[in-house]
Amino acid sequence: MEERPQPAAHFPSKTVFFNNTIDGIGGAAIFVGQTAGNATVNSSLTAVISGNNITHPTSSTNTAIIAFLTSCNGANCPLQVTTANILIENNIVTQNSTGGTSRGIFVDTPDSGTTPSYTVSVLNNTVHVGDGMTGVNGIALQCRRGTGCFDVRDNKVDFPNGNPGGIFGLRVRQADTGVLNLERGAALLANPPLTVLNINNPATTNEVLGTVAVVENNTCLPTAN
């Protein structure tokens, strides 16, 4: 399970991680998100994660780039919808972890009873998964709560030491109460979501789980900048 750093995101904010070289950190190298189960309607988050080169050691226990979206859950504060717009582009991640849990890029809505509304653009990233035995998805994009809109294009995930059995390079997953939309990119609106991923990310193997709706381009928020 990914360990979650604690952000301070109660108010509108913009976060930028640009052109960094990060090597040897076994936890999350880059994290963006809102305070777990306690983000208000005022916590509008914009984040740009671009051009970073991250190398994770074999001892890594967490994903290199993480975005966790959340909101108040009715316990600590009244249930309300938060907004976020995140761009993850042109990053290179070499994931050498042998622990069987660490990805290159992970987007999720992990907190029960929350209602985040968010757009995530994942464009032209490269992830090398070094563990050919217990490695996991290089890129995993999930919507388990709230409403997510994804633009996913031109990504590459490879397994230079062999592809672990049953593991795909890129996964898009809807589960629980989440509502997930996927922009069609170069595909047709009538194409199923897996075909959309395959057309827009031909340099990796792709997987779709749950109910994912293919939507017209520009349905999501404009790409964060």
Image (cartoon, rainbow, N blue to C red):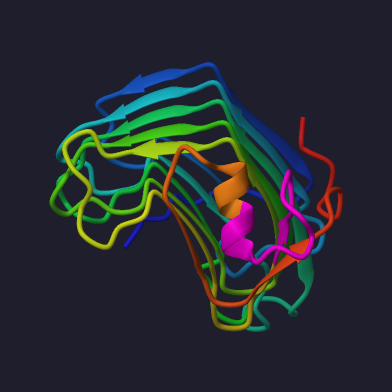
Q: Position of residue 7 (x, y in %)?
A: 55, 48
Q: Name the residue: 85% across, 55% down.
A: 219
**Quarter of the rendering containing residue 123:** top right
Residue 40 visible here: no
Nearest the eye: 114 or 160: 160
- Asked whether, in this view, residue 102 is left or right of residue 139, the answer is left
Q: Position of residue 101 (x, y in %)?
A: 26, 56
**Quarter of the rendering containing residue 36:** bottom right
The reply to whether the magenta stretch includes residue 185 is yes
- Asked whether, in this view, residue 164 is left or right of residue 81, the answer is left
Q: Give the range drawn in magenta.
A: 181-196
Task: Indicate whether 51 appears above or below 168.
Answer: above
- Asked whether, in this view, residue 107 is left or right of residue 86, the answer is left
| Quadrant, the C terminus | top right
Q: Name the residue: 23% across, 33% down.
A: 160
Q: Where is residue 29 in the image (x, y as percent from the top left)?
A: 40, 35
The reply to whether the magenta stretch includes residue 190 is yes
Q: Name the residue: 15% across, 40% down.
A: 59
| Quadrant, the N terminus | bottom left
Task: Indicate whether 211 appears above or below 193.
Answer: below
Nearest the eye: 78 or 80: 80
